[in-house]
Image: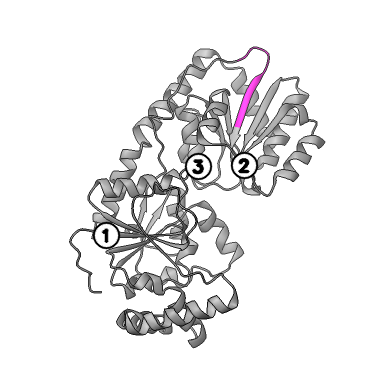
Amino acid sequence: MTKHKTVRPTIGIVLSTVPRYSETFFRNKIKGLQDNGFRVILFVDYLEVSDGTFGCKVVASNAFNKNIFKRIWYSFLALLKSFFMHPKRSYTLYTLNKRDGVSFQENTKQVILNQFFLKEDVDWLHFGFGMLAVKRENVAAAMCAKMAVSFRGYDLYLSPLKHPGCYDVLFTKTVKYHVLSQEMKQELFRYKIPSNTIEVITPAIDLSFFTANTIVETKNRVELVTVARLHWKKGLVYTLEALALLKQLGIAFHYTIIGDGSEKERLVFAAHQLGLKDNITFTGKLPQTEVKKHVEAASIYVQYSIQEGFCNAVLEAQSLGLLCVVSNAEGLAENVLNGKTGWVVPKRNPVLLANRIEAILKLSEAEKQKIRENAIARVHKEFGLLKQQEAFVHFYSEN
């Protein structure tokens, strides 16, 4: 493959849309790359209204989701651009797709839909989620660029169940993979991906914002909190069942769930059936400053997920000095070290979760403080933004 020559390294990052102000991961990554001399171009499928704070070039796909007449018009324009503005790249993309067994009709469609990539020059084309690379497996090669793909929990573990075989073509290509945990790296081994093409770079948080204050535990009840999208994979029903067991033991508590999602009605009804209606507050989605206030008001953070790539919210809770109880789903057991920085409980077992929370409540204040201090120290050492930014600089600097 011929490497494209640029004055300075250029990274093309592919996302569905421009990250919102609250979506700090990609914003911090882009800023870190720019601070280290990289040029960044963001490719998006949909261009929503920007908040005016995004600091790199944004290249958006044409509005193929509009009405049929606009789709036909944009498709015609895309074909013209393919033939007259970058014919070599368009032909290369078509040829590589054909080699993969893509039909003429589907191949033509892919060339049209992916035309907006081909006009730009990048050294790396990095798909921010695995599914964004599907039907784009040859775009980087057509651009004479290296290809990278980030896998997060949902797209590595759940997308192949929802879309069987979705990564069959991708896993035959020369790709550098970014995953969030060692467990996810092991999962890629199942697909025969070589170890030297996979790099683990964990999430990171703004340590200057998530700074611990003194935890003051109330005498009359324990305050628990979870920050999560209301989705079945977060295991919130199991959490509610565990709390119902604690209530039967006469333990006074209040549980705050921060977030919104498709499962809210189900969870509210579950809380009602379990007799927890007066013990639980559903706040809905909140701004980051409000999330922090609610988390700081609690003493125990619970993340009893069924599936979880890593979870920034758990890092934030540890940095704020909360005692964290998590499941053993994927990266959570690397996020929290069992018995050292928090506790890891086997998933789908409300009895074990209830027993663990009860045991935590019986710990002496000195024992609790030791866990808090261990967690804060580890997060500050391992999960700061600077360390993550340095890791991505290294990721793109390797041959």
Which residue is at the front of the view, 114 or 304?
114
Q: What residue type is labelled 3?
A: Cys
Residue 343 shows in this picture: no
- Helix, strand or loop at label 1? It is strand
149, above or below 66, in the image: above
x, y percentage for residue 399?
23, 60
Task: Check residue 222 for magenta coloring.
Answer: yes
203, above or below 222, in the image: below
Q: Which dot marks residue 347?
A: 2
Q: Whole-Å distance between the Cαs marked 1 and 3?
A: 29 Å
Which residue is at the front of the view, 33 or 168?
33
Looking at the rendered image, the disc whose residue lies closer to the viewer, 3 or 2, is 3
Task: Check disc 2: other Cα within 10 Å, few if <14, some if 14-19, many if 20+.
Answer: some
107, above or below 280, in the image: below
373, above or below 163, in the image: above
Give the mark, 3 or 2, whose residue is nearer the N terminus. Answer: 3
- Look at mark 3 in the image and give the residue it sits on: 311
x, y percentage for residue 226?
60, 34
Give the mark, 1 or 3, whose residue is nearer the N terminus. Answer: 1
Q: Which amino acid does label 2 sit on?
A: Lys
Give the mark, 1 or 2, whose residue is nearer the N terminus. Answer: 1
Q: What residue type is labelled 1?
A: Thr
- Helix, strand or loop at label 3? It is loop
Q: Which residue is drawn at 46% across and 40% down?
A: 334
Locate residue 161 relative to residue 46 in the image: left or right: right
Task: Read off the magenta span.
Answer: 218-225
Which residue is at the front of the view, 302 or 361?
302
Q: Are marks 1 and 3 in contact (CB under 8 Å)?
A: no
Q: Are marks 1 and 2 in contact (CB under 8 Å)?
A: no
Locate residue 284 relative to residue 35 in the image: left or right: right
Q: Residue at x 47, y 48 (%)?
A: 20
